[in-house]
Image (cartoon, rainbow, N blue to C red):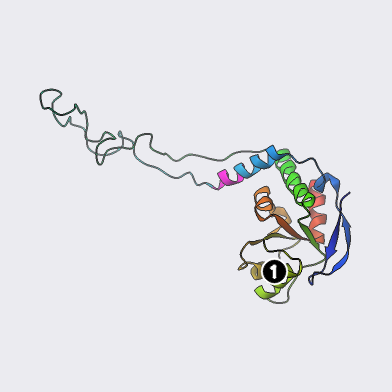
């Protein structure tokens, strides 16, 4: 089992924690992590873009001039794509961009991402994280004490003071254990996580 240091909010080491290899020490599957990121980004797309083809634009029912004898190229409609106000060639239509992954694949991808963070020594476990008021300066001080600039902060329970304190810090995002995903773990690189949140993740994914 990998052993990591546990810090307090002042950045002082207060103990160690053994991580479950079934979650934080698996074989990294880059293909599944890639699929998870593609799936998440694709599922965010609305798919509502739409334009009209030549059969949908109004007008153009009459042949603009006769087939021969005018000196012009032959034309069948003023709503063909090459005309101003004509239809669009292969016009985009509302569609579903979603990419599906099964539960086992999602879990394996998250465990791979967590393992990669541990392997890169970018995980910072805090014994507890809570504020008695909303103060961005306090959250920034915690991150400075850990020497972290860009991080995904994972909480074991919803704490509005912590969430709102971190909201205005560039490169920092907060989430609960049930909201972790491969894209955010890889995007932010460093993982600042409470000790109780580690236990919750191990309970779900072990």
Residue at x 80%, y 56% (from the top left corner): 198
Helix, strand or loop: magenta stretch = helix
Residue at far top of view: 68
Q: Is residue 27 left or right of residue 189?
A: right
Rendered location of residue 33, percent (x, y): 68, 42
In the picture of the structure, the residue carrying the numbered disc 1 is 162
Q: Position of residue 177 (x, y in %)?
A: 73, 55
* Relative vertical location of residue 182 with respect to residue 143 in this rendering, above or below: above
Range of residues picked out in magenta: 39-44
Write down the quadrant of residue 86 in the picture. top left
Percent position (x, y) of residue 19?
Answer: 85, 52
Q: Nearer the viewer, residue 107 or 25?
A: 25
| Residue 174 appears in the picture as rendered | no
The secondary element bearing badge 1 is classed as: helix
Mark yes or no: residue 25 visible.
yes
Q: Quadrant of residue 126?
A: bottom right
Residue 123 lies, with reference to residue 69, above or below; the image says below
Q: Position of residue 12 (x, y in %)?
A: 83, 70
Between 190 and 94, the one lying in front of the other is 190
x 67%, y 50%: residue: 186
Does residue 22 sit above or below 189 in this rendering? above
Crowding at mark 1 (Cα within 10 Å: few <14, some 14-19, many 20+): many
| Quadrant of residue 88 within the rendered picture | top left
Side of 32 where 124 appears, left or right: right
Foreground: 90 or 178?
90
Q: Does the magenta-highlighted stretch encompass residue 18?
A: no
Left or right: residue 126 versus residue 91 is right
């Amino acid at each position: 089992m990998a052993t990591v240091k546990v810090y307090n909010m002042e950045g002082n080491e207060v103990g160690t924690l053994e991580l479950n290899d079934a979650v934080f020490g698996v074989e990294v599957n880059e293909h599944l992590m890639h699929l998870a990121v593609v799936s998440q980004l694709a599922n965010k797309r609305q798919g509502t873009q739409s334009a009209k083809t030549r059969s949908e634009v109004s007008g153009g029912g009459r042949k603009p001039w006769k087939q021969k004898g005018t000196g012009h190229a032959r034309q069948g409609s003023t709503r063909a794509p090459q005309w101003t106000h004509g239809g669009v060639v292969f016009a985009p239509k509302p569609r579903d961009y979603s990419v599906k992954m099964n539960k086992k694949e999602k879990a394996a991808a998250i465990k791979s991402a967590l393992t990669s963070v541990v392997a890169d020594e970018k995980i910072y476990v805090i014994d507890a994280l809570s504020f008695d008021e909303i103060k961005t300066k306090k959250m920034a001080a915690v991150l400075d004490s850990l020497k972290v600039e860009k991080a995904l902060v994972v909480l074991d329970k919803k704490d509005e003071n912590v969430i709102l304190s971190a909201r205005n810090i560039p490169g920092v995002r907060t989430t609960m254990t049930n909201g972790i995903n491969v894209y955010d773990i890889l995007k932010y690189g460093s993982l600042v996580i409470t000790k109780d949140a580690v236990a919750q993740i191990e309970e779900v994914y072990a």
